[in-house]
Structures are given as C-alpha cells and as structure tokens.
Amino acid sequence: MILIVDDRPENLISLQKVLQAHNFEVDTAPSGEEALKKVLKNNYVLIILDVQMPDMDGFEVAEAISGFSKAKDTAIIFLSAVNTEIKFITKGYLSGGLDYITKPVDINILLLKIKTFYRIYEQNRKLNEVQEKLLEEIEFRKEAEHKKDEFISIASHELKTPLTSVKGYIQLLQRSINKDDKVMAQNHLEKASIQLEKLNELIVDLLDISKIESGKLKFNMKTFCAETMVNNTIEMLQQSNPEFTITKLGTIQEMVFGDEMRLEQVVINFITNAIKYAPGTNQINLTVNIKDGKLYLAVKDFGIGIPQEQHHKIFDKFYRVEENSNNFNGLGIGLYICSEIISRHNGKIGVNSVPNEGSEFYFTIPIGADEILAD
C-alpha cells in the first residue's frame, strides 16, 4: 500500500486517482502528524511525501519514520515544488528518502519509479523469505547432525557393553572348563547368552529402523489369535523376569487381523520398558480388550514416570527421557519402531504418565482387514 502525504487536498486527490487507476492501493494523510500516526498503525511499501508542509515538513517526517522499526524498509519519495535546490535534494536523501522529485511531476516517470520500488520491495520480500527458510533448514541440519552424532555415540556404547561382557564371560568360561567346574561354566555360559540376546535386540532395532527409513519394513498381515499371542508373550517375559508379577486384565475373544510378530514386538517392548523403568517395584498390569471393533492393549508400571512436557516426544526417533538418559541403557529407538508398527496397522499409540507414579503405554488398532488396509 502507498501513503500519500500532502497538506493540499487537490494534490492528494489527483495523485490518489492516478495511482488507483493503475491498480495501486492508496492511503492519504493531510499532515506530517497524521502520517506518523498512520505509519504506526499500517504497513506501507512506499510513502510519497511532500516537502513543504506547515508545522512539520517532509524532512522531519522522514527522520521520524526512520526511527520506527516497523517502517525501516519503507521507501520514501520526496515531492517538492519550492525546495528544488541541490542542498534540499541532498537533505532529502540524508533524511531517509530514496528519491527526490521536483514539481511539476511527470506522472509517467513517477509511475515508473513507483513500479520499480514495488518490484524491489517484492524481490526483497522473497529474498527475506528464502533467507528465513534457509536459516530454518540450517538449524534443522544442525539439529539432525547433533542427533546423529549423539545416536552414534549412544549406539557405540550400547553395542560395546554386551560385547565386553560376553568377552569377559567367555574368558571365565574357559577357566572354568580348564578347572573342570561344570556348574560355574554353565553359570558363565548363561550370563554370556543373556548378553548376546541384548546384543541381538540392539542389532534387530538398528535393522528395523534402517528398514523404516528406506520404506522396506515388511509386514505379514493375516488373521491370528491375539489372546494366544498376548498370553505367550506374558509367559515368556514372566519366566525371564521372575521378580516381577505381570497381571493380565481382560481377554480377547475375537480374531485380529495384523502382523502377529510385529504386534508381539510392541507388547514385548512395552513390558520390557515397564520392567526397566520401574526399579524397586514388582508389579506390572497388562490390560487388553476389544471395544467398537478395535483392539486396546495397555501396559502399566509403577516406576519413575515421565514428565508431561516430554510425552509428545517419547515416540520420536532417538529420543530418550532427559532425566533418565544417563541412568538406563538403550538406543532411544524402540518406541519409535513401535509407533511405526502401530501406524502401519492404522492405529494409535500413546502414553499416560506421572513422575514417580508410573507410566502406562497403550495402543489401539482396528481388528478387521478392511479398516487396516483402507489406507
């Protein structure tokens, strides 16, 4: 929008009509004081400013406008019929004007200048937009690079830990064999097997996330008995974690359509996380039921919990709860993989948690093939 400032009504009206005839949006002000009020309220691309005005001349208005942060990019063209000497033209440029035109005005030249200023304004606006987007992208590259470096550091540590343990147990196993101590040898072998299983889980997670990134994570969708899958998962984890009591609440009578192995992977992740992040407790509740054609499954622990402000990040790739990242091992990708699995089942995943009161992770998925394959 263009602001015309002139104390003569006939000048305002005539110039306004000419500019409007060329499809410019125009506003007017009959004095310098009125112009300053309008500049504070509105955004203008260009101000056409008469120099010779009572009370406050054009130079004073321009100097005042230059102090307004919101108008710092606004172009000013001075118009003058009286002050046409070089010293006044110089003063106009020093006051912040980008051009100084003497009257009588050649309207065609004025229109060309206005169109040029508009073109420059539009180019600057686009350049600023590009610059802002580039800055955003640079910050996103920096953040991604930081996350990548952090992940590599964590992954290296997490993979090295079980390898070091396995190496140590193999050395102890060799000594026990040399001493013909079968009981101790069996004990070391079992502990080495546990560490190898941890290593295997880490590698599987890394392979899964690689497949997710490349769009190659395969799903074997078919109808299966979810009740059996849940019961078998609980039994397996109960045997390997006898210090915990895993209580199942609810049953599933209906058959479910989906990838049984992948959904079992989600349930295992929920339960193992509940065990890991609930030290000093011994109770885990798994609730399962079917309502309105959807399978609902939730695993609740009574452990350390998660602050509310971190709930929306918990399923992000590589995210680890800040307060616990140094106290518990893990790559920060298990829940991200779970969320991808549930998403592929056209379902929803979430968490309810209160610090020091425990966490409940849950998901819902449609049980029918039509709803899952709809997308």
Image (cartoon, rainbow, N blue to C red):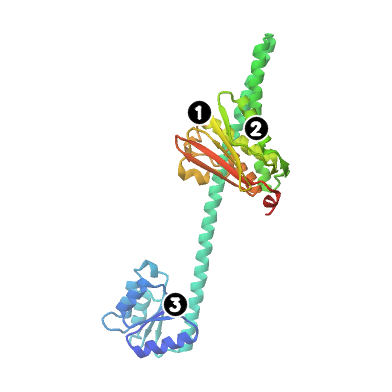
Amino acid carrying mark 2 in the image: Asn
Find residue 41 and report its image quarter: bottom left
Question: How packed is label 2: few (under 14 Cα within 10 Å), some, or many (20 or more)?
Answer: few
Closer to the eye: label 1 or 2:
2
Give the residue at mark 1. Answer: 279
Give the residue at mark 2. Answer: 231
Whole-Å distance between the Cαs marked 3 and 2?
Answer: 70 Å
The x, y position of residue 67, in whole percent, is: 34, 68
Q: Earlier in the sequence, mark 3 or mark 1?
A: 3
Residue that protrudes farthest toward the left in the picture: 55
Amino acid carrying mark 1 in the image: Pro
Between 338 and 157, the one lying in front of the other is 338
The answer to whether 253 is drawn above or below residue 102 in the figure is above
Find residue 104 and report its image quarter: bottom left
Q: Residue at 55% across / 26% down in the picture?
A: 244
Question: How packed is label 1: few (under 14 Cα within 10 Å), some, or many (20 or more)?
Answer: few
Mark 3, secondary structure of its residue: loop
Q: Is residue 302 visible?
A: yes
Q: Earlier in the sequence, mark 3 or mark 2?
A: 3
Q: Is residue 46 left or right of residue 218?
A: left
Q: Is residue 339 visible?
A: no
Give the residue at mark 3. Answer: 1
Amino acid carrying mark 3 in the image: Met
Between 303 and 114, the one lying in front of the other is 303
Whole-Å distance between the Cαs marked 3 and 1?
Answer: 65 Å
Query: Which quadrant: the C terminus?
Result: bottom right
